[in-house]
């Protein structure tokens, strides 16, 4: 969660109040959501480690994802490798209307960094921004820089996976985050739909 967000209790146990750069937001919460928000305030957290709401039997993500969508403008998203060396990159919202739609990058589409993307080296990493973009990306580790380098010219995700000495899921994950943050875009038209089969002549 963004470091300037303050989390306090509401009028009763079913409400949490979040105060940040875009004002105050009141949110109906249960124990699971409150615990997730508390951990997120401390730093990056794997939501699967928060645990299930006692007695609910519902997967965490089915409970938490609607909340995270509502708080998209306050949530800092990170991606990491499973090596305990810290995140690869972090995505910070810059707009009250920021929407982060993460999905699998299309393997056969040509993608590249947005023309005009700025790269500035700061104390916390390599900072990427696009003019009037909804997000800022901070790259913390060289592995993510390798992926970015593949996208300085049009490149298919499957070709980046083949070229880089990284687990395929890591390469695809970084590309997916760059797409969701608006730092990378497709540069070729989507494939045309397959024609419908013709029926027998009448």
Image (cartoon, grey):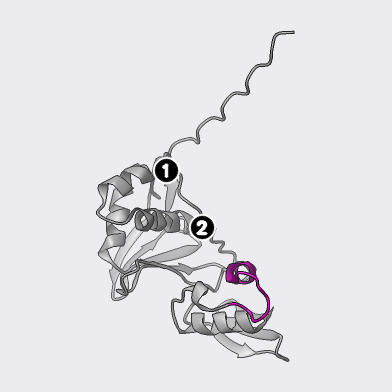
Between 85 and 139, the one nearer to me in the picture: 85
Q: Position of residue 64 (x, y in %)?
A: 60, 71
Q: Which residues are magenta?
A: 52-69
Mark 2 secondary-structure assignment: loop
Instruction: Name the residue furthest top.
Output: 202
Query: Is any part of residue 125 visible from this angle?
Result: yes
Q: How many marks?
A: 2
Q: Residue at x 37, y 62 (%)?
A: 128
Q: Residue at x 28, y 76 (%)?
A: 123
- Which numbered disc flags the more N-terminal residue, 1 or 2? 2
Label 1 neighbourhood size at 10 Å, few (<14), some (14-19), many (20+)?
some
Q: Position of residue 200 (x, y in %)?
A: 69, 12
Task: From this view, report whether residue 21 is shown above or below residue 120.
Answer: below
Q: Residue at x 57, y 30 (%)?
A: 193
Q: Is residue 151 left or right of residue 76?
A: left
Q: Quadrant of residue 143?
A: bottom left
Mark 1 secondary-structure assignment: loop
Query: Is any part of residue 152 visible from this angle?
Result: no
Tell me the residue that label 1 is attached to.
107
Tell me the residue that label 2 is attached to.
102
Instruction: Name the residue furthest right.
Output: 202
Q: Position of residue 153 (x, y in %)?
A: 31, 44
Q: Position of residue 127 (x, y in %)?
A: 34, 66
């Amino acid at each position: 969660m963004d470091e300037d967000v303050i989390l306090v209790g509401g009028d009763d146990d079913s409400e949490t109040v979040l105060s940040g750069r875009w004002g105050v937001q009141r949110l109906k919460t249960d124990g699971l959501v409150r615990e997730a928000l508390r951990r997120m305030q401390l730093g990056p957290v794997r939501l699967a480690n928060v645990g299930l709401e006692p007695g609910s039997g519902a997967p965490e993500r089915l409970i938490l994802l609607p909340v995270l969508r509502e708080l998209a403008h306050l949530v800092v998203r990170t991606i990491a490798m499973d090596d305990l060396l810290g995140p690869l990159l972090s995505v910070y919202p810059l707009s009250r209307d920021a929407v982060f739609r993460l999905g699998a990058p299309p393997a056969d589409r040509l993608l590249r960094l947005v023309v005009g993307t700025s790269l500035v080296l700061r104390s916390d990493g390599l900072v990427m921004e696009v003019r009037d973009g909804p997000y800022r990306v901070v790259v913390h580790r060289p592995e993510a820089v390798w992926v970015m380098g593949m996208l300085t010219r049009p490149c298919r995700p499957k070709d980046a996976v083949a070229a880089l000495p990284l687990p395929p899921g890591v390469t695809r994950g970084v590309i997916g985050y760059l797409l969701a943050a608006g730092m990378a875009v497709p540069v070729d038209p989507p494939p045309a739909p397959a024609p419908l089969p013709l029926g027998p002549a009448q």
